[in-house]
Amino acid sequence: MATLYTKSLDLLARLEPSISILNAVSTFVQSVFVRVRGDGPLVFHDFWRRTYHRRLDIPKKEYPILIQGCLKAWSDFCEDSLADGMSLESASQNVVSSSYFYGVQSTIK
């Protein structure tokens, strides 16, 4: 069953990626990392890979801080490349709840 989060990111993936869209949806996108339930972080990962991850025309330093924190947390935990080129030493701790790590760990492994 698709969640509201899944359906929303599927719709967002159809739009041309831009900083203005990220600014408008950053709180919603980040919300799945606050209380991890189901496959939300994996849905975010898939969305990001399909859309913004390969966009060299959108500088990572311009991503909203909430989005940067999600990317950094995912990358730190999964040893993934989503946050390559970002330098946010504390953003992942400030933005993402520790419950994220337990939820993703049980989903991935």
Image (cartoon, rainbow, N blue to C red):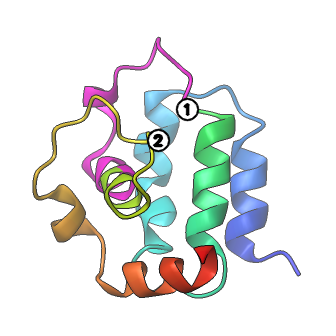
The image shows residue 41 at horizontal and vertical percentages of 55, 68
Which residue occupies 34% across, 33% down? 84
Who's the residue at 41% across and 79% down the image?
A: 100
Q: Please tell me which residue lies in front, 81 or 43.
A: 81
Residue located at (44% from left, 42% from top): 82
Residue 70, x across and y down, in percent: 37, 58
**In the displayed structure, would residue 108 be above or below residue 70?**
below
Residue type at mark 2?
A: Leu
Query: Alpha-carbon distance for marks 2 and 1?
Result: 10 Å
In this rendering, would 34 be left or right of 54? Answer: left
Q: Are marks 2 and 1 in contact (CB under 8 Å)?
A: yes
Decide which of 24, 4 is in the foreground and name it. 4
Q: Residue furthest right?
A: 1
Quadrant including the C terminus: bottom right
* Extreme residue in the top direction: 57
Where is residue 102 drawn, in percent x and y?
42, 87
Secondary structure at badge 1 equals: loop
Q: Is residue 63 magenta?
A: yes
Sequence-first disc among 2 and 1: 2
User: Residue at position x 31%, y 57% from top?
Assistant: 76
Please state which of the two labelled residues, at mark 2 or mark 1, is closer to the viewer: 1
Q: Residues within 10 Å of mark 2 (few under 14, many from 20)?
A: some
Dot 2: what SS?
Answer: helix
Q: Is residue 45 magenta?
A: no
**Highlighted magenta segment, given as a residue range:** 53-71
Position in image of residue 85 (x %, y %): 28, 28
Q: How many marks?
A: 2
Quadrant the N terminus occupies: bottom right
Which residue corresponds to mark 2?
22
Residue type for callout 1: Tyr
The residue that label 1 is drawn on is 52
